[in-house]
Structures are given as C-alpha cells and as structure tokens.
C-alpha cells in the first residue's frame, strides 16, 4: 500500500514538475519580450532550456538530498529517451523525416563532440568541480554559436512574426538599470497576473522536483533497486514528455527542423548544464548501471542518429527500430535479461 502511494506521488509530482516548467518558461518568455529583449536572446536564455528545466531542477534537488548518482542517470536517461523514444515516435508519425544539409554540417558533429566530452567526463565514474566548469563553459560557447548563426531567431520566428521590438540590447549599464526601474511601470502593459504566475510556477517547480526525487528514493527502497535506475527510466520518460509533444506536433506539421532541433538543444543542455551546475556544489558519483549500461546505449543512440543524419532521411521503420532499442535499454537496466 505504501509503495502504491509513493508511485502515485511520483506520477503526480512529475506531472506538476513538467507543467510548472512549461508555465515558468512561457511566463519568462512573455516578460523578456515585453521588455524588448531580442527574441533570439530570450530563446537562448529561456526557451532553449525550457523543456530541460525539469531535468536541471530535479538534479539540483537530488544533490541537496545527497543522491548525487541520480544526476548522471537523469541526464543520460533523458538523452537516450530523446533519441530513441522521441525521435522514434516522431519518425513513425511523420513516416519519413527529411534532414537539411545544415543539420549534417553543423548540428550532428556538434552533438557528437558534446557526447564525446560527456564520455570523458564520466570515464572515472565521477563529475568534479573542474569538469562541471568545463561543461558549463562549453555550453556558453554553444550559446554564442547559436547567437552568431541566428538559429534561435529562426526557431522563434513563428512566435514573434509580429514583434516590432528593437533587436539590440542596451549598450550601457545605465540603460540596463533604467529597464529594471521601469519593471513595475511596465507591469500593466503585460498580461495581468504574469508575475504572480511566474512566482507560483517557480514554487510548484520546486515542489514537483522535490517530491519527484523523494518518491524515487522511497520507491527504489521498497523495490530494493537503485534510485538511478528509476531516474534513467520512469523519470527520464516523464521529463522527456515536453520534447515528445513538441517534436511529434512538429512532425505532424512537417516541420522537421523544429522537431529535430528541439532534441539537439535538449540533449546538449542535459549533457553540459544538467551535470555541470550540480557539479559546482559537490562531486557527483556515477553508479555502475549508469556507467556500464546507460553510457554505452547513449553512445549507440548518438552513432545511430549520426548515421540517420548522413542519409538525410529518417523513415518510419527506423523509428520503429529506435523504439525497440529503447525497450531493450529498459530491459537491460532492470536486469530482466
């Protein structure tokens, strides 16, 4: 009975976490654009991390509870789910996804490089402060790449087609301070309740993450399995639902660049920031299952994705294959075979 209660708490808290992250991101985006912050800056600072916010918050909560093994398991499990589960479903829905050449020339090599860096970071089964700094700096470089290439501007253009705001940030500290001083004066020009909504979503974001980790610990204890296994499976699937929804919807509308770009941004954020920021507070441990099963499957997922990218098409049969491999991954981490 106690186990069923904690499973129920896990499902509810995970749903609250995902929804709160969505509301928080949407409210932050509205505030950023209302103050005429360039849309591509808003995209990099807010939208690009929005779908990965649950992974980051749960990782920070896990560190606060001294369950550091969950961090790497969370990041790796989410990245595997993003490729095998999300892209698998998206390819089945689309029947055939076409990949643009720019994706092959820039994004795929970038994902391969980030995955390789993650392998080196995890190789000694721990993530240190210095490695966390390296991961975060790498993400900053990646962000500058997005700005220079103007990718986020293209991704967000459908949201901001009528945005006539100035696309330059104030050059001086005084101008920036003036914007902050006008915060409450501009409040009435924003949608009513946007600031309370932002605050409330932040509170629910914390509560959802806290009870998600707490329930994982109790479920793992009741079933006598390691918490990272649940983090790599159930939690990874739950926190990947935003990516699944976005990518499947984009595939249905034949917007394959958005469907696939969503996965690139999320996986790179998970590999660099989700493990990087928690590592600033303490050395993170990597458990044996995550290292011996999760990491090889992540490498395999990345390699298969690269192969699919080179062919510039992902067919529905490849999507089915991705899903079958994901089922095999779940079977392996639970030790069923």
Image (tube, grey):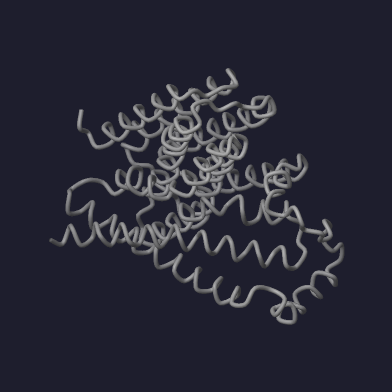
> Is the C terminus in the top left, top right, bottom left or bottom right quadrant?
top left
Occupied quadrant, residue 18? bottom left
Residue 4 x/y as whole percent: 18, 58
- Above or below, 125 against 220 in this view is above
Occupied quadrant, residue 61? bottom left
Which residue sits furthest left?
1
- Above or below, 61 against 245 in this view is below
> Is the N terminus in the top left, top right, bottom left or bottom right quadrant?
bottom left
Residue 13 x/y as whole percent: 35, 62
Residue 195 x/y as whole percent: 60, 75
Which residue sits furthest front?
253
Q: Between residue 105 and residue 321, name the one nearer to us.
A: 321
- Above or below, 273 against 300 in this view is below
Quick check: 203 left or right of 196? left
Q: What is the total number of numbered labels drawn onto the structure image? A: 0
Which residue sits furthest top?
311
Residue shown at 73%/67% (left/top)? 34
Quick check: 213 left or right of 113? left
Residue shown at 53%/63% (left/top)? 23
Quick check: 177 left or right of 254? right
Residue 300 x/y as whole percent: 44, 25
Residue shown at 78%/73% (left/top)? 179
């Amino acid at each position: 009975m106690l186990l069923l209660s904690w499973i129920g708490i896990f499902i509810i808290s995970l749903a609250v976490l995902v929804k709160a992250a969505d509301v928080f991101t949407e409210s932050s985006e509205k505030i950023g654009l209302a103050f005429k912050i360039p849309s591509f800056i808003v995209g990099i600072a807010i939208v690009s991390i929005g779908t990965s916010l649950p992974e980051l918050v749960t990782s920070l909560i896990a560190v606060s509870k001294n369950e550091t093994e969950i961090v790497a398991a969370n990041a790796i499990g989410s990245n595997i789910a993003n490729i095998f589960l999300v892209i698998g479903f998206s390819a089945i829905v689309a029947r055939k996804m076409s990949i643009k050449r720019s994706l092959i020339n820039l994004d795929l090599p970038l994902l391969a490089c980030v995955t390789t860096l993650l392998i080196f970071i995890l190789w000694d089964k721990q993530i240190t402060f210095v490695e966390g700094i390296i991961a975060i700096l790498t993400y900053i470089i990646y962000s500058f790449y997005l700005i220079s290439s103007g990718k986020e501007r293209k991704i967000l253009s459908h949201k901001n087609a009528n945005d006539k705001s100035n696309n330059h940030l104030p050059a001086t500290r005084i101008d920036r301070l003036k914007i902050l001083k006008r915060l409450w004066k501009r409040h009435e020009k924003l949608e009513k309740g946007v600031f309370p909504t932002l605050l409330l979503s932040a509170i629910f974001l914390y509560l959802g993450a806290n009870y998600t980790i707490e329930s994982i610990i109790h479920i793992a204890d009741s079933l006598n399995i390691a918490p990272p296994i649940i983090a790599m499976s159930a939690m990874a699937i739950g926190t990947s639902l935003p990516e699944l929804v976005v990518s499947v919807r984009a595939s249905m509308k034949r917007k394959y660049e958005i469907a696939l770009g969503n996965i690139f941004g999320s996986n790179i954020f998970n590999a660099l920031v989700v493990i990087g920021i928690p590592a600033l507070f303490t050395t993170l441990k990597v458990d044996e299952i995550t290292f011996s099963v999760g990491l090889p499957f992540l490498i395999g997922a990345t390699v298969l994705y690269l192969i699919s990218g080179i062919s510039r098409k992902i067919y529905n049969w490849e999507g089915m294959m991705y899903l079958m491999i994901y089922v095999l991954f779940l079977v392996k981490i639970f030790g069923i075979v």
